[in-house]
Image (cartoon, helix red, strand yellow):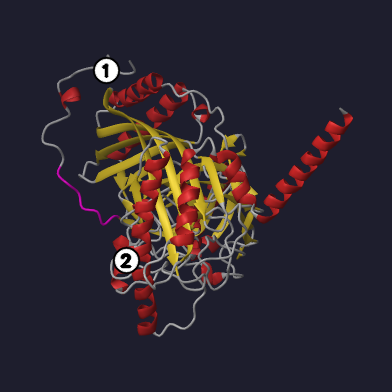
């Protein structure tokens, strides 16, 4: 018996050495093989990728030097309601595949070039079977890979011709060298999502607007997604991660007395259903939102204003998102045959040439950390363990004492940086680009929020102004016009110097905004606001969003300019809303 045990131990020792040898040579492949048996999708991806890299070649043309598959499984529950009635309820499942096939080399390949059709600048993608049928999945992978390979050959040839025509000599590479990573997660309990309960919640929240006759239209929309993201590339990186999300959006529209249309929305974004506030809190927030929209109808307009502006909470977060975060994102310039067609691509990365220079007030510092999941007890929407390109993120210092120290990087190199910092993000139907996770704004010059208002009024008084401006809500960055740095302010107040009284105003927008506003911040609050939101992508025709968060204090800016909106008023409805116009009460509201 003792001899048998000795033989067994020797075999086990040899097996351990074999495992260590496999992990050293092919760490990701070994991990995948341990899980692929119960994941037919990963197995199909791995097998077809291996075959493509080994055998995919057309005549005497080049083989791919790199390939990757990205597969997204989604189960979506969508519920919408208006004025106390359900408009739509759908539950559907989908599985989407994107194939990235590259010809050439890391230094120069077929990517980062749109050619003559910017709207076709995206990876090859398709809906594939939602069932885990290995053979059906292999067929879908093979078919899309073949299309992507043929297109890559053509695009690579066109790109080289473009470079020759333009006389381009200096290039920075198209794909960075990164360490292969593997992350295979199993689904963990995220809390029950009861469709019937949420259907009733959405219906009751929409009924709140029955109390507000001045609001012309309103909707409450819920989107709950159970998502599995799988990725595998020819370098050995692979992952299976879960990206669940719940978004509740409350929107409303009205018209001012002059006929100016006003529309706004309020979002609640969370990764887990259990993080959503209870119904009473949601109802109170909806009442507050509806009340503000009603006040806007009867609010006054304002003329030109030039002076200090206080941005509070959500408005402060969007100030930083639109002036700073968006302009250190999407940093790689995309070539196109027709420069005019580049209008479809957000010309961001505008601050990246300021590396090492002061871009903010010297008492401000900024970092991004996707690995943090909470701040002050609030869940963060921009958390992730590995980016879409298979690179692990970490804490990234962006601004130190007002000076730009870094910016977001995907695997597309630029002049200043040659490697990714784990921020290659995007949707399956777009090329991944450099984008944020959780952005933290830190200040060494703070005061209680009420002191910020006092400082605001004192600054306005010194300038001989009758009032100062407070902005409490702004439209999101995705709503900006092409030529604007900042979107419209949605909730704007005059704060009168004489007594601090506030008056809600409508019909104003920013004018002459520049990056100087970041340097003109003079004071911040000592409390922080968590803004969970979706950051819009770089393509105007496909604003594919990624979840993100900004944690920021309120800010006082020394000088900004506002003007009367250029939006034209419209005619008011000829007949009143039938519910209110016929003298009906609100007997059913809240049921």
The residue shown at (29%, 55%) is 565
The residue shown at (45%, 61%) is 55
Q: Of residues 233 and 78, which is closer to you in this image? A: 233
Q: Residues within 10 Å of mark 1 (few under 14, many from 20)?
A: some
The image shows residue 5 at horizontal and vertical percentages of 84, 32
The residue shown at (47%, 73%) is 108
The answer to whether 396 appears left or right of 95 in the picture is right
Q: Is residue 188 above or below residue 117?
A: above
Majority secondary structure in the magenta region:
loop
Whether 569 is among the magenta residues is yes
Q: Residues within 10 Å of mark 2 (few under 14, many from 20)?
A: few
Res 336 quadrant in image: bottom left
Q: Which residue is mark 2?
A: 343
Quadrant that contains the C terminus: top left
The image shows residue 106 at horizontal and vertical percentages of 52, 70
The image shows residue 219 at horizontal and vertical percentages of 30, 32
Q: Which residue is mark 1?
A: 586
Label 2 residue SS = helix
Whether 47 is among the magenta residues is no
Label 1 residue SS = loop
Using the rendered image of the protein, determine whether residue 499 is visible from the camera's viewpoint. Answer: no
Q: Is residue 59 above or below residue 48?
A: below
User: What segment is highlighted magenta in the picture?
Assistant: 565-571
Q: Is residue 433 above or below residue 14?
A: below
Q: Of residues 1 and 509, which is closer to you in this image? A: 1
The residue shown at (77%, 39%) is 12
Q: Earlier in the sequence, mark 1 or mark 2?
A: 2
Separation of marks 1 and 2 at Cα, in angstroms: 49 Å
Query: Total number of numbered labels?
Result: 2
The answer to whether 37 appears left or right of 145 in the picture is right
């Amino acid at each position: 018996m003792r001899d048998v045990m000795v033989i067994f131990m020797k075999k086990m020792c040899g097996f351990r050495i074999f495992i260590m040898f496999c992990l050293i040579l092919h760490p990701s492949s070994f991990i995948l093989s341990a899980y692929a048996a119960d994941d037919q999708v990963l197995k199909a991806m791995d097998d077809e990728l291996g075959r493509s890299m080994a055998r995919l070649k057309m005549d005497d043309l080049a083989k791919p030097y790199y390939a990757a598959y990205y597969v997204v499984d989604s189960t979506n529950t969508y519920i919408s309601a208006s004025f106390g009635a359900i408009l739509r309820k759908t539950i559907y499942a989908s599985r989407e595949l994107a194939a990235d096939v590259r010809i050439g080399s890391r230094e120069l390949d077929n990517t980062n070039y749109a050619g003559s059709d910017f709207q076709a600048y995206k990876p090859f993608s398709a809906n594939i079977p939602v069932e885990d049928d290995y053979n059906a999945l292999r067929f879908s992978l093979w078919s899309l890979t073949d299309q992507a390979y043929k297109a890559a050959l053509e695009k690579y040839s066109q790109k080289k011709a473009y470079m020759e025509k333009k006389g381009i000599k200096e290039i920075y590479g198209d794909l960075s060298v990164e360490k292969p990573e593997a992350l295979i997660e199993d689904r963990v309990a995220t809390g029950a999502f009861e469709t019937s309960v949420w259907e009733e919640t959405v219906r009751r929240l929409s009924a709140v607007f029955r109390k507000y006759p001045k609001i012309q239209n309103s909707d409450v929309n819920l989107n709950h997604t159970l998502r599995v993201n799988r990725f595998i590339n020819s370098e050995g990186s692979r992952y299976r991660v879960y990206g669940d999300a719940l978004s509740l959006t409350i929107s409303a529209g009205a018209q001012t007395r002059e006929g100016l249309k006003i529309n706004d929305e309020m979002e609640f974004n969370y990764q887990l259903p259990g993080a959503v506030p209870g119904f009473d809190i949601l109802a109170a927030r909806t009442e507050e939102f509806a009340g503000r929209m009603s006040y806007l109808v009867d609010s006054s307009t304002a003329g030109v204003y030039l002076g200090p502006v206080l941005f509070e909470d959500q408005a402060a977060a969007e100030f930083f998102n639109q002036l700073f975060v968006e302009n250190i994102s999407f940093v790689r310039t995309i070539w196109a045959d027709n420069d005019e067609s580049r209008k479809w691509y957000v010309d961001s990365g505008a601050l990246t040439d300021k590396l090492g220079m002061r871009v903010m007030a010297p008492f401000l510092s900024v970092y991004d950390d996707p690995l943090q999941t909470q701040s002050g007890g609030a869940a963060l929407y921009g958390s992730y363990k590995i980016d879409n390109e298979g690179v692990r993120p970490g804490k990234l210092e962006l601004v130190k004492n007002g000076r730009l120290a870094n910016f977001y990087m995907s695997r597309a190199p630029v002049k200043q940086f040659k490697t990714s910092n784990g921020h290659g993000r995007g949707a399956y139907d777009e090329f991944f680009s450099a984008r944020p996770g959780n952005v933290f704004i830190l200040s060494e010059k703070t005061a209680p929020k009420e002191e910020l208002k006092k400082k605001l009024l004192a600054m306005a008084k010194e300038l001989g102004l009758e009032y100062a401006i407070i902005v409490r809500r702004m439209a999101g960055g995705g709503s900006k016009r092409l030529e604007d740095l900042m979107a419209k302010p949605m909730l704007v107040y005059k704060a009168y110097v004489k007594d601090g009284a506030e008056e809600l105003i409508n019909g104003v927008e920013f004018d002459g905004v520049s990056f100087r506003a970041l340097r003109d911040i003079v004071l911040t609050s000592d409390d922080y606001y968590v803004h969970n939101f979706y950051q819009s992508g770089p393509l105007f025709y496909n604003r594919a969003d990624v979840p993100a968060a900004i944690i920021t204090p309120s800010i006082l800016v020394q000088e900004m300019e506002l003007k009367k909106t250029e939006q034209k008023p419209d005619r008011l409805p000829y007949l009143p809303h039938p519910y209110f116009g016929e003298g009906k009460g609100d007997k059913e509201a809240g049921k």
